[in-house]
Amino acid sequence: MIDEKNFKMLQSIEGDLIHIEKNLAKIIIDTPKEFLKIPGLIYYFTSILTKNGVNIVDFGTTFTKLILLVHERDLSRTYEIISKSLKQVTATK
């Protein structure tokens, strides 16, 4: 994932680009270490977004982060859904 400024530079590099997808937004969900003990947490977040019609273009994880790429048009709704879901997970643990 790169921004528009660096996209032009990348285009000048020889070789084939695999895929270009514009107008994406990145959401980084910071989670406490305790969340690592909750089975299915990634499934929980991705399934809630899917059920609400949000297409996850790509995602990645680290020790305490879930990184989602969504279309910019879905950014506000995604943020609201994730915020609500985090509150529910925090309340039940």
Image (cartoon, grey):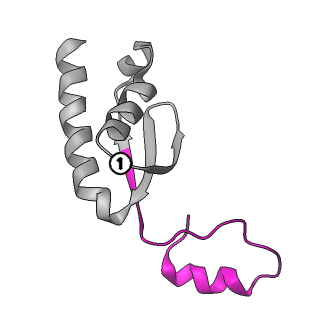
Front position in the image: 55 or 38: 55
- The magenta-colored residue range is 1-28
Q: Is residue 90 left or right of residue 18?
A: left
- Left or right? Give the position of 88 relative to 24: left
Quadrant of the image containing the N terminus: bottom right
Nearest the eye: 27 or 32: 27
Q: Residue furthest right?
A: 15
The image position of residue 71, as x and y in percent, is 39, 61
Instruction: Based on the picture, tell me whether residue 12 belongs to the magenta stretch.
Output: yes
Is residue 5 positioned above or below 61 on the image?
below
Q: Which residue is mark 1?
A: 54
As displayed, is residue 33 above or below residue 59? above
Residue type, label 1: Val
- State which quadrant residue 29 falls in: top left
Q: Identify which residue is drawn at 61% across, 86% down.
A: 8
Along the viewing direction, whichever of 47 and 10 lies nearer the viewer: 47
In the rendered image, the quadrant that contains the C terminus is top left
> Residue at point 37% right, 39% down?
50
Residue 65 picture location, percent across and down:
43, 37
Q: Residue at x 24, y 30 (%)?
A: 86
